[in-house]
Amino acid sequence: MARDIAFLLIPRFSMIALFSALEPLRVANRFAGEAFAWRFVSMDGEAVVASNGIPVSVSASLEEIGRPDVVFACASYEHEAGMVRPVLNELRRLARNGALLGAVDTGAFLLAGAGVLDGYRATCHWETLPAFRESYPGIDVAEETYVLDRGRMTASGGAAALDMMLDWLGSIESEALAQKVADTLVHTRHLNHPGEARVPVGSRYRLDDPRLVKAIRLMEEHVEDKVTLKDVAAATGLSDRQLERLFHKYLQMTPVGFYRQLRLDRAQRLLTYSRLSVRDVALATGFSTLAEFSRAFKQRYGRPPSHARMSIA
């Protein structure tokens, strides 16, 4: 009998993440018979518009789906739309009934809000990881592209969902099938080895100097508990002046300016995706006073931090 898989679509979900999770199932059926059946569901049984503006029809509401074998929560920019009591109650019911629960992109927030990720390892989109970690201390948040942990599967979004599904296929069917699916989709597998949740520093900034890469990593690891630039320089084997020259050469910025920008970008994501107060966000991003944070935030984004939650990017 085919495994019954339901994809719960939340308004403005990520289309690429959805189909990265779905297409491996379609291809697997070519080689394994009708091993999988899938359907799209929504909170109210109505069509859902993805983040790219394309509406997707569904077959039922979440409350009408019965007892599927697997349920994936698919969300992106507006996961808060799914953080409502009827949805969370249904996710708890599905967990009690033994369904395998998965999520892509920010769908992990729904599972976390329902309490069905407590005690599990999980991940979500890198932009929301700090907010996710702050909001749900009972979850072992992994900075990886995807995580399979007992009856839970979470992917950070985009192509990560494809890697997650291939690993899952390998575990429930066979590695041979998973490899056939990967080959058909012209995808190179990183077998049982999820990558970092975010594109590595060197690739992200197109840097080939390992000292500068190390400096940026150190800054990213110390957003709340700020390190001094003297410490950053020492850790990379550079003098303060050499560090300044490297930042100017590759990034056209001072180390101080880059570090502040990095912290403000983290603050903007926390304001967008978490329920932390503005004061708590300031502290979580290394600002000693609310006034200092507000000035810096407004200078970078053109609006005070209190307005950041009003327009989710």
Image: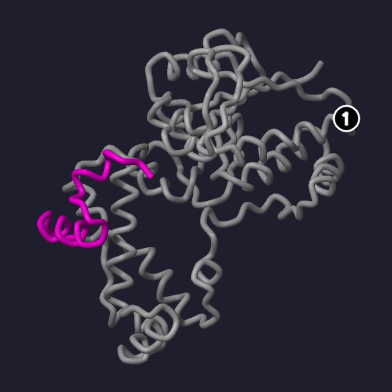
Task: Indicate whether 263 appears above or below 149.
Answer: below
Task: Indicate whether 221 appears above or below 40.
Answer: below
Q: Residue at x 68, y 46 (%)?
A: 163
Which amino acid type is shown beneath numbered disc 1? Ala
Q: Give the dominant element type of the magenta stretch: helix, strand or loop.
A: helix
Q: Quadrant of residue 154?
A: top right
Color theme of the render: one colour
Q: Residue at x 22, y 56 (%)?
A: 302
Q: Which residues are magenta?
A: 287-313
Numbered circles on residues, count: 1
Please identify the quadrant where the N terminus is shown.
Answer: top right
Residue 197: percent from left, percent from top: 53, 53
Looking at the picture, tell me which residue is in the foreground, 255 or 52.
Answer: 52
**Crowdedness near tag 1: few (<14), some (14–19) or many (≥20) residues, C-alpha within 10 Å:** few
Q: Is residue 227 left or right of residue 235?
A: left
Q: Quadrant of residue 256?
A: bottom left
The residue labelled by disc 1 is: 32
Q: Is residue 167 left or right of residue 312?
A: right
Looking at the picture, tell me which residue is in the foreground, 171 or 279.
Answer: 279
Looking at the picture, tell me which residue is in the foreground, 169 or 162.
Answer: 162
Find numbered disc 1 in the image and state the secondary structure of the residue it sits on: helix
Looking at the picture, tell me which residue is in the foreground, 169 or 98.
Answer: 169
Residue 187: percent from left, percent from top: 76, 52
Task: Indicate whether 192 appears above or below 117.
Answer: below
Please identify the quadrant where the C terminus is shown.
Answer: top left
Q: Quadrant of residue 135?
A: top left
Residue 96: percent from left, percent from top: 53, 15
Residue 305: percent from left, percent from top: 21, 49
Instruction: Please say whether residue 141 is one of the residues in the magenta stretch.
Output: no
Q: Is residue 250 left or right of residue 192?
A: left
